[in-house]
Amino acid sequence: KADVYLNHMSSVVALAKEAPLSSRQLDSFQTSLKKVEQTFFDSPSVRAEAYLTEMELHSALGDLKTAEQIEEVWHHDIETGNADKPSKAASDRITKLKSAK
């Protein structure tokens, strides 16, 4: 069920990479993120994907500082066992984000 929200968030990220987002689109992303946090954050894999997708959004919006802060929270959650470590594919996505600076 979390996949529905994560896929929606990924769609908004794809839009953000192509053109500026409307406030409605940003609100929609935040609503989906909030639903994931409230309902599915007990799953380390969902938490990891949510962090990565949120990092991608902020990167696409040019807000690299927030993307880095989210990554720091993610690393903390990895250390406490609340989030999964990045998979190989996720690591590749993070590398791509960082090289876009």
Image (tube, helix red, strand yellow):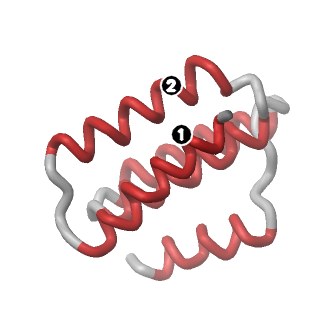
Horizontally, residue 70 falls left or right of residue 22, namely: right
Specify which label sits upstream in the sequence, 2 or 1. Answer: 1
Q: Identify the residue at horizontal 58%, vertical 53% (top origin).
A: 52
Q: What is the x, y in percent for residue 89? A: 73, 71
Which amino acid, by three-letter code, is at mark 1? Tyr
How dense is the environment of label 2, judged by Cα within 10 Å: few (below 14), some, or many (20 and up)? Answer: some
Secondary structure at numbered mark 2: helix
Q: Identify the residue at horizontal 53%, vertical 39% (top origin).
A: 5
* Residue in front for this viewpoint, 59 or 21: 21
Toward the right, the furthest residue is 81
Residue marked by disc 1: 5
Q: Quick check: can you spot residue 54?
A: no
- As displayed, is residue 48 above or below residue 68? above
Which amino acid, by three-letter code, is at mark 2? Lys
How far apart, in angstroms, are the residues tagged by discs 2 and 1? 8 Å
Label of residue 35 in the image:
2
Q: What is the x, y in percent for residue 15? A: 32, 65
Q: What is the x, y in percent for residue 51? A: 57, 45
- As displayed, is residue 35 above or below residue 101? above
- As displayed, is residue 85 above or below residue 92? above
Toward the top, the furthest residue is 38
Q: Identify the residue at horizontal 80%, vertical 62% (top origin).
A: 87
Q: What is the x, y in percent for residue 90? A: 69, 65
In the picture, the quarter occupied by the C terminus is bottom left
Asked if marks 2 and 1 touch (Cβ < 8 Å), the reply is yes
Q: Place residue 50 in its image quadrant.
A: top right
